[in-house]
Image (cartoon, rainbow, N blue to C red):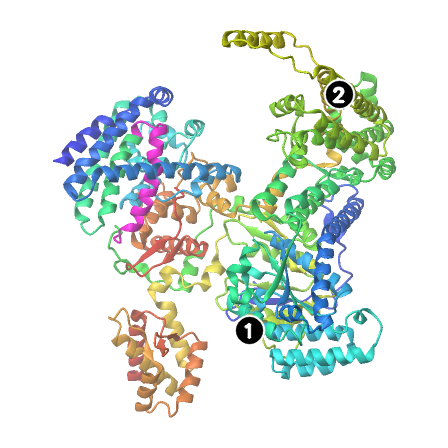
Amino acid sequence: MSKLELKEDKMLEVQFVGDDDVLNHILDREGGTKLKKERAQLLVNPQKIIKKQEYGVEEGDQEVLKDQNYVKVLGQNVQESLKNGTATDGGNKVYSFQNRKYPEKMAKLASELAKTPRKNVSFSLKNDPEIKSISQSSKGHSASDKVQPKNNKNELQSTPPRSLRKRLIVPSSHSDSESEYSASNSEEDEEVAQESEKDTNASVLSQKTQAASRILVPTCRGTPSKRMRREDSSNLVEEYFEAHSSSQVLTSDRTLEKLKRAALDQQTLRNLLSKVSPSFSAELTRLNEQHEKLFHKWMLQLHLGFNIVLYGLGSKRDLLERFRTTMLQDSVHVVINGFFPGISVKSILNSITEEVLDHVGTFRSVLDQLDWIINRFKEVWDHAKQSLYNWLWYETTTYSPYTEETSYENSLLITQSGSLPLSALTHVLRSLTPNARGIFKLLMKHQLENQEDPSYPGLSFQDFYQQCREAFLVNSDLTLRAQMTEFRDHRLIRTKKGPDGVEHLLIPVDSQTLTNFLEEEEEATVTA
Amino acid sequence: MATSAVSKGCFVFKPKLKKRKISVPIEEYFNKEKNESEDSKLRFETYHLTWKQMKSETEQLQEELNKNLFNNLIEFLQKSHSGFQRNSKDWACQIKLKEIPTAALVLGVNVTDHDLIFRRLTEALQNTITPYVISLQAKDCPDMKHFLQKLISQLIDCSVDTKPKEKEDVQVTQKKTHCSMDSLSSWYMTVTQKTDQKMPSKTRTSQWQSPPVVLILKDMESFTTKVLQDFITIASQHLHEFPLILVFGIATSPIIIHRLLPHAVSSLLCIELFQSLSCKEHLTTVLDKLLLTTQFPFKISEKVLQVLTNIFLYHDFSIQNFVKGLQLSLLEHFYSQPLSVLCCSLPEAKRRINLLSVNQCENIRRLPSFRRYVEKQASEKQVALLTNDRFLKEETQSLLEDLHVYHVNYFLVLRCLHNFTSSLPRYPLGRQIRELYCTCLEKNIWDSEEYASALQLLRMLAKDELMSILQKCFQAFDSSSENQFGSTRKRIEEFLAQFQSLGDAKEEEDASGSQPKELPKTDLYHLQKSLLEMKESRRSSKKQTKFEVLREKVVNFIDSLVREYLLPPETQPLHEVVYFSAAHTLREHLNAAPRIALHTALNNPYYYLKNEALNSEEGCIPNIAPDICIAYKLHLECSRLINLVDWSEAFATVVTAAENMDANSAASEELNEIIHARFIRAVSELELLGFIKPTKRKTDHVARLTWGGC
């Protein structure tokens, strides 16, 4: 019942307002919006009462208002400080909160993007029969646009919300878009209402705020004004917490297994990608050439005691490699791949001491080594210079794919296909002694037996030793420990200290891969 | 590629020996790629020279500023150690002996500058008090054992410095010694005895039969409480045989000592506080010495100064970084402006003008300020300036001279104005001279509201304030060697004399008019009436006193000075030669915003790629954008978790639409695979960039790591 009421009221509120009217509204009729806001608040009440009678409604309202005041102040501060920062486009967009997303948004956007012709979006829109779907999904945009705190009027006028802009573009279809808007709103609200009905598990607070925010959103759309913006900022916070309070996330349950082509390993991936001709190659080379012009300057600055940081989207490896080969041929230099998984302070320092300075021997600790290097370089570097990093920042956006960088990562889709670790596992285990393989298989089986238990800590060392002894795989504690070290070096196992101080051993590979591996192994032994 | 391998991530490259020639001199890099720039070598040398001068100036400044602090500190150390020297049996002394003398140095939050101060302090202490000065950092001392190890090794290094012969010996023993306080004190005994025997009454150690050991803890806040407490407790037990003095470097406030140390421990310390000069004052002096002077020809524009001070005030409070920023602007100036070759001392510049090439002359003619200047000249002179190189050079010389004079006057008047405005209530023109300087650089200061209100406030100053300010201005003009301001100085002197005489006259006046007229006893009505009359009469007789007239004169005088001399530099011809104005490059390099760059690259690829097909209205991107942009855009539509299948399908929809516009050709399996591979690449790139991460909360889902960005 209350739902019906709600819908009706909103139908009344959400109506098309011409830009002039909006302006008038902002400038003159603040009182009117206040009234509307109160109505909105009133609308919340019955729902709340129906849902949770035990809550003191009045009290809650007051608190919400107080919070809003506080948030308003906060929001303003944020805005001001941002203005001091670099005002590149989208500056404040980067730092806004996330708003609530609806499940089908991505698909909608995708279809929108797919249907968008190459050029001149706005022109073709006029006659496009798809206008409805676009305006629908663009409404999502408008909501998200609004969520950002906007404090002064100028800003609002200069960047009108998307829905407004859309309307500017299609002035002929006023009535259409109007009806479209209200219809989609009610649709959405129905959906929302269903959701909240389903959401019985969600906490009381979140339900309350959900309801409040949802009812306030449409009013904001209709009448943007100072008062409403206050609501916006509160929405923003509420929605942030809403997004984080409910443990349930609404996404579809489809999995990759249904897609046949999910399993790809590194090699096939590369082969496939090599068939794609890169787009915008002319522009990319132009970008790169621009960066390369700076090589001389970099050298100069490096010589004068500055250091250089490159930032921006895209792999900088090729660029750096070119810099290295063209400019650094006559000087000693070290290249450190930070994305390399096994990189450590120790390895970097070692390569410096051993290869650059031709030092043979070891160091007690990293700090000692560092001291030694500093001493060696004292003749070369001025102390003050070397203790400082004078970073100079250069933006070098290249859009080059991060091929090399990502190839070390166990990337999402590649790991899930499981083929890479599986091949690695087989590879490593082939090179081990039969005993060692037996030891590892024992651990593997134990882990698979316990895969249902989410809190499985791993096999304790003592138990493991016992089992290995029983299987005649080891004869002493020490042999097993030596074997463990080897496994650890190959990253085949991980040890964790339990709460009682006992070491637990785990194989950091998912059970699917383990099962596959065991099956393969058994096949191999059978055929052999 | 030479730098990719599966086994290691660290590659060393050495130049081939036979190829090793004389390394390219740095000047070579000063050339731009096109090799068109003029006088690059000379410019580089000028840069080098100027920078060297500026650097030594700042260092000297630093030293002067530290001197006071160091002297106080050294005095304290001497005083506190003398108790140990006397070895008296006095009870009070015995109590005092249990307390470790401690100097707490409050240095402010600009931690990056501290290193320099500590280095100087160590040198100063080693020269005056004791060879045993050790400094420890928190990162070296995670626990007591490391603390003592570091302490001992540094101490032994200290003594090695004095007796290099024993180096080998000590190196060996160092590793074997068990590090404890006992071993420390026994070491100390032997060392002091040795020195006593060796040099009975010579050198600095003679003042101290047993020189104290000064331990500097550079960053006291980051030490773990336990280590500090234990060390202090143990050290105080051994104080009678191991004279330790502590120096704490504190970045925040002295309260931290009591927060870190419980009463039982802090009572073992005899703390004295030392405050260093605040970094803001430091900045003011640096600016004063480097920029507000004609000693260095190089100047920066208002925007650049703003960027540098903003970085200083809002980011790090670090003088060193500020000076580095200045260095960068100097470098950029000499690198990018071919005419910067003239940015040197006036006589040298005049000499260089004569040697300028034809191209450089053209460069001068191209300067906007010079063109403006030419337009104002008579037509014959215009022709001569534009065609005759020789005439141009002569004119340039005189213009440069004018520029120099302009600067001399500028800074004098600026200081003078600052004297007047710095004490006004609510500081309409800023409290610091740099704020005033910024405003003056930016525009005609007399057009600003703040200036008007400042003048208004000046018109209300009391006599003694005005006189003291005038006195200061007089000194400023007096100290300047230039004699353009002879008349100005005289004017001020006159004003001062007039005020003086006014004071005398006024006293007489006061004496005569001071007797209050006795009011006859009246009723309330009459009193009111008479009061009203008095008020009326006062209002009508708005005649100014002599003082007021004089004050008006002074203010007008200052105003005329400002209007004459504080013209913004843009009005001066050839200002481009000495002013560096590319604030955006400076900001880009010193205070970059990588996140915004990333966001722009992902959201608006047109910004970088400049391909018209990518140009679209804000907020949406065309479907032919780079894969990663499309994947990013799609992922923005999701909440915390993203279903990979949905994502990949959405991606495929977009990409297929972009690939084949007709969309009716049946997508082959291979094409699908390629698209899937592209999707995988885009997703892994997003993962590398930190937008998403794998999650185990739901199968085939990834978690978003960023908020907003829609």
Q: Are marks 1 and 2 on the same chain?
A: yes
Amino acid, disc 2: Glu
Q: Quadrant of the N terminus of chain A?
A: top left
- Which chain contains the residue that carries disc 2? B
Q: Earlier in the sequence, mark 1 or mark 2?
A: 1
Question: Which residue range is magenta in the image?
Answer: A221-248
A280 and A449: which is toward the camera: A449
Residue A293's x, y, as percent? 64, 47
Q: Residue drawn 58% across and 46% down?
A: B591
A114 relative to B484 in the view: left or right: left
Q: Residue drawn 73% across and 23% down?
A: B558
Q: Is residue A236 magenta?
A: yes
* Observer able to see residue A377: yes
Residue B578's x, y, as percent? 75, 36
Residue B461's x, y, as percent? 67, 24
Within 10 Å of disc 1 (Cα), the crowding (few <14, some 14-19, many 20+) is some
Amino acid, disc 1: Met
* Observer able to see residue A116: no
Q: Is residue A330 magenta?
A: no
Tell me the residue that label 2 is attached to: B507
* Image vertical order of residue B46 relative to residue A343, above or below: above
* Image vertical order of residue B544 relative to residue B177, above or below: above
B355 and B667: which is toward the camera: B355
Tell me the residue that label 1 is attached to: B144
Q: Quadrant of the C terminus of chain A?
A: bottom left
Q: Nearer the viewer, mark 1 or mark 2?
A: 2
Give the quadrant of residue B414: top right
Within 10 Å of disc 2 (Cα), the crowding (few <14, some 14-19, many 20+) is few
